[in-house]
Image (cartoon, helix red, strand yellow):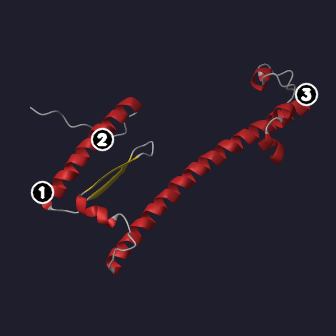
Amino acid sequence: MGRGRTEIKRIENPIQRQSTFYKRRDGLFKKARELSVLCDADLLLLLFSSSGKLYQYHSPSVARFMKVDEGQQYTLPDLGLLEHNLETAIGKVRVEMDRKIGAQIHKLETMIARVQMLRGMEADGSASSTPGLDLRLGTYSSVDTLLGSSPWFSAHF
């Protein structure tokens, strides 16, 4: 008797998710290898983990499409296919870079807003009466002293 169907949804537990990824990755590569051998197919499989690590499988005949050698003679369709694949890959890299840069910009904007809020509180005189503020600022007597030690903040404010 077989097991019941598993509902396909995101696995919330990161350890279980990673374990499932590796098991299924190995199964997917096995199927790709079988398909390549049984059907004499040219096969390239690229897989990115959630951490961004690249895993790949390709049949031996695909390796010639993955590099452009100076002495190699390519037909126009081959070059067109290479160009298309490279443009697609570059597009995906740019989207991921934009996403990561956007996240870093958001993080910096949040930090700047917090610094400006702390400066405003200090200017109003409410910083000394705010419990816990001295702990967050460490041993610095003012926000300006804290920020003066940072070359980035000194250059931008």
- SS state under label 1: helix
Mark 1 or mark 2: whose residue is earlier in sequence: 2
Measure the C-alpha gap from mark 3 to mark 1. 77 Å
Quarter of the image that includes the C terminus: top right
- The kind of residue tagged 3 is Gly
Near mark 1 (Cα within 10 A), the count class, few <14, some 14-19 or many ≥20, is few
- SS state under label 2: loop
Q: Is residue 105 left or right of residue 12?
A: right
- Image quadrant in which you'd find residue 144: top right
Measure the C-alpha gap from mark 2 to mark 3. 56 Å
**Residue pointed to by mark 1:** 38
- Where residue 72 sits in the image (x, y, percent)? 34, 74
Identity of the residue drawn at 38% across and 69% down? 68
- The kind of residue tagged 1 is Leu
Up-down relation of residue 64 to residue 48 (above or below):
below
- Where residue 152 sits in the image (x, y, percent)? 77, 43
- Where residue 124 sits in the image (x, y, percent)? 90, 31
Up-down relation of residue 79 to residue 136 (above or below):
below
Of 15 and 130, which appears nearest the observer?
Answer: 15
Mark 3 or mark 1: whose residue is earlier in sequence: 1
Up-down relation of residue 140 to residue 48 (above or below):
above
**Residue pointed to by mark 2:** 8
